[in-house]
């Protein structure tokens, strides 16, 4: 799905902080967004955190092949209990991860804690198109086609069923902006992409 990679590129361009030096990529997975961030900010120190140690291992292999061990590092960690001091990072990013938080408000509050004053959070997440016709097509695809592809191509086809349910349940748009504000962020914005299939959210820690 090429639009996922396009969304990642646009999410990185949403970063407004001038030459950030310390960037956190939460729910980093195999490090794709961390690598995209490195392209724009090659001098920044990027930390990717994820609960899945197997994903981290794949990410570390990617970094090693590209010779970026000095710029990007990974660690296994929990989004709701980030093992780093308050006011550490200039920017925090999350791509397609916040909908999996067990406690969304707690996870966002924790990201706020580790950001420096005026630090920026950028979130890229799936969302539901607002156009009724597109919404029906989107839901039909996610519910009927994507799981079938998953059963053929994936070792874990149940993950595709979960994807549909998690996107359905996620409080997107203004609802998510309200949660961001309640978690200590200001100047919160959302930018729907690809007819609303995914959305970039941004907010800044209060100074």
Image (spheres, rainbow, N blue to C red):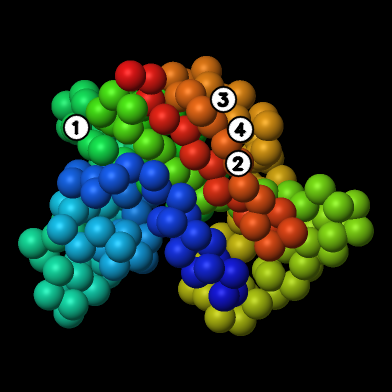
Give the residue at the far left of this rendering. Answer: 70
Residue at image point 17% right, 79% down: 65
Q: Which mark is residue 25?
A: none
Residue mark closest to the camera, 2 vs 4? 2
Mark 2, residue position: 190
Mark 2 residue element = strand
Q: Would you say 109 lies left or right of 149 here?
A: left
Percent position of residue 124, x then y: 51, 50
**Residue placed under numbered mark 3 in the picture:** 179
Is disc 4 in contact with disc 1, using a CB cutoff of under 8 Å? Answer: no
Q: Are marks 2 and 4 in contact (CB under 8 Å)?
A: yes
Circle 3 Cα neighbour tier, 10 Å, few/some/many (<14 / 14–19 / ≥20): some
Tell me, yes or no, whether the two marked residues, 3 and 4, touch with CB atoms within 8 Å.
yes
Mark 2 packing: few (<14 Cα in 10 Å), some, or many (20+)?
some
Q: Residue at x 59, y 74 (%)?
A: 1
- What secondary structure is found at the residue carrying circle 1? loop
Nearer to me, 49 or 198: 198
Q: Is residue 203 above or below residue 94?
A: above
Q: Indicate which disc, 2 or 4, sits on the residue closer to the N terminus.
A: 4
Marks 3/1: CA distance? 22 Å
Badge 4 or badge 1: first in the primary sequence:
1
Q: Nearer the viewer, mark 2 or mark 1?
A: 2
Relative to 31, say whether 107 is above or below: above
Q: CA distance from mark 3 to mark 4?
A: 5 Å
Reading the image, the residue beneath label 4 is 176
* Disc nearer the start of the sequence (3/2): 3
Mark 1 packing: few (<14 Cα in 10 Å), some, or many (20+)?
A: some
**Distance between mark 2 and mark 4 Cα atoms:** 9 Å
Q: Tell whether 181 sits left or right of 66.
A: right
Instruction: Report the front residue among 163 and 152.
Output: 163
Q: In the displayed image of the protein, which residue is found farthest to the front?
A: 18
Per the image, the residue denoted by label 1 is 88
């Amino acid at each position: 799905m090429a639009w996922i990679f396009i969304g990642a590129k646009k999410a990185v361009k949403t970063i407004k902080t001038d030459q950030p030096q310390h960037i956190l990529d939460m729910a980093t997975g195999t490090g794709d967004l961390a690598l995209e961030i490195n392209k724009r900010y090659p001098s920044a120190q990027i930390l990717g955190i994820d609960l899945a140690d197997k994903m981290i291992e794949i990410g570390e292999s990617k970094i090693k092949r590209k010779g970026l061990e000095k710029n990007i590092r990974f660690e296994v960690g929990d989004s709701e209990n980030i093992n780093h001091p308050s006011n550490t990072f200039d920017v925090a990013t999350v791509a397609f991860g916040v909908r999996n938080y067990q406690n969304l408000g707690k996870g966002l509050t924790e990201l706020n804690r580790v950001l420096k004053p005026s630090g920026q959070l950028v979130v890229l997440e799936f969302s539901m198109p607002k156009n009724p016709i597109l919404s029906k097509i989107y839901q039909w695809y996610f519910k009927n086609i994507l799981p079938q592809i998953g059963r053929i191509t994936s070792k874990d086809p149940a993950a595709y069923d979960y994807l549909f349910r998690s996107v359905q349940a996620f409080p997107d748009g203004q609802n998510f902006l309200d949660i961001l504000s309640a978690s200590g962020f200001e100047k919160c914005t959302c930018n729907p992409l690809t007819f609303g299939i995914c959305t970039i959210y941004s907010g800044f820690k209060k100074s």
